[in-house]
Amino acid sequence: MKLEVLISKKGTKVVKATNLHAALQLPNDQYGKNVRKWLKEVYGFRDGIRTPSPMVDFAKRSTDNPVVFDYFITIELAKLIALNSTSKVKRKFANQLSVLDEEIYEEKKEVSPEAILEVISLAKKMGSVSFQAANERRHLEKYKSENGSAANWWQYRENILGYSSSFWKDGALSNKELAKGMSQRELLFNADKYETIRAGVVDYYMSMGKTAEEAQELGDLAKTFADKLGLEVWDDRQEAKPQGARVRDLNQAEVQPQQVLWAS
């Protein structure tokens, strides 16, 4: 059985779960059980040890068969699945997928000087909360146009941004008393103000049709520049709360002037 590599609508190389399962010569009657396990297993991705994220590492594939479900799986995840499987031919396909994964990784590492200048410019603009919010809305509209509704939007976006439950629990929500009444943006700002810039840049590139991997890479780059340049983040929206309503720092008893941010 040949392993077919496809190109998704976003330009990402993927394989089908049904094809991968067949290529690994795993029993047909174990397909459903195996795939469910694949998507819940813990793997060593390049960005850390974690479970696969929907719309980042895999996406459901529409089929005419109401009984057999299928998924598009990224090359990196497919490689990890093959290595973790009990297949007798796993080395053959793991090697094939590993070569493709390295090619994709090398391609992603090459960022042109023009792209770097654009990211720096975007990082500066993302200091404006209204600009962050506008790009978040654009990302949401693109998501709705592709999925027909806003269902599962927040889970999808948190997966794209890489926010696990431990990210909130150990960071912004570590002090539950001080976190009461805060918006997600306020919580994020208090955990790491430059993360709001990264999130805005990821929203921007996702709304422009970039793949999740590309948007994440450029978002990470923007956050690095924001930190190195010491950029500020401020709320410039007209609907901001009355002067004096300050965001509370979760790590300090007193609010610092640069930590002013309104709910949204």
Image (cartoon, rainbow, N blue to C red):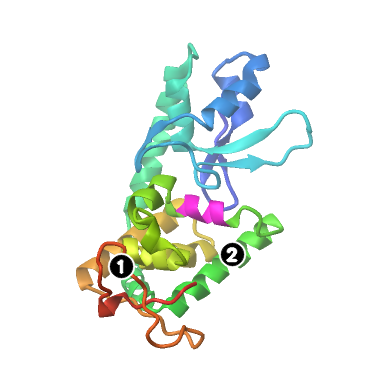
> Can residue 200 be seen from the camera position used here?
no
Is residue 246 shown left or right of residue 39? left
Residue 244 point in image, percent of width and height: 37, 85
Residue 44, compared with residue 223, is above or below; it is: above
What residue is shown at x 30% (from left), y 67% (from top)?
A: 249
What residue is shown at x 64% (from left), y 41% (from top)?
A: 60
Instruction: Please tell me whether residue 156 belongs to the stretch shown in magenta.
Output: yes
Q: What is the span of residues highlighted in magenta in the rendered image? A: 154-160
Tell me the tag on residue 140: 2
Residue 122 point in image, percent of width and height: 37, 73
Real-space Cα separation, disc 2 to disc 1, in angstroms: 29 Å
Is residue 216 shown left or right of residue 19? left
Q: Residue furthest front?
A: 177
Tell me the tag on residue 249: 1
Specify the amino acid type for callout 2.
Answer: Leu
Specify the amino acid type for callout 1.
Answer: Asp
What residue is shown at x 66% (from left), y 16% (from top)?
A: 28
